[in-house]
Image (cartoon, rainbow, N blue to C red):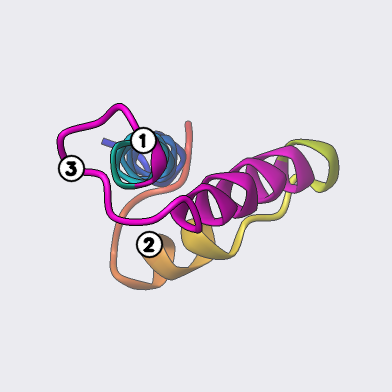
Amino acid sequence: MTSWQLTRVIAGAFILLSLALGAQGSPLFQSPMWLWFTAFVGINLLQSGLTRWCLMERILRKLGLRAAD
């Protein structure tokens, strides 16, 4: 798995988890403030798509994951 693939898996997991914790209909509901975390992850994905720079990818590469081929 490459760094960009794992970055997207992590982002998707963060979004689903924060929606589960922030949506009032969810059995895991804690607080609607969790939806701010969903927005934060979405903004970071948008920013990385426009600038082609992502801190999570840089961290994963330093941990030894290979870059995209």
Residue under numbered circle 1: 24
Residue at 15 percent across and 34 percent down: it is 27
Residue 16 belongs to magenta span: no
Residue at 75 percent across and 45 percent down: it is 52
Mark 2: give few (<14), some (14-19) or many (20+) Cα within 10 Å.
some
Residue under numbered circle 2: 60
Magenta-colored span: 22-48
Dot 1 or dot 2: first in sequence order is 1
- Residue farthest to the right, as pictured: 50
Instruction: Specify the quadrant of the image occupied by residue 26.
Output: top left
Residue 35, horizontal then vertical, whole percent: 52, 47
11 displayed left or right of 37: left
Residue at 18 percent across and 42 percent down: it is 28
**Which amino acid is tagged 2?**
Leu
- Residue farthest to the top, as pictured: 25
Q: Which mark is residue 28?
A: 3
Nearer the observer, 65 or 18: 18
Q: Quadrant of the N terminus?
A: top left
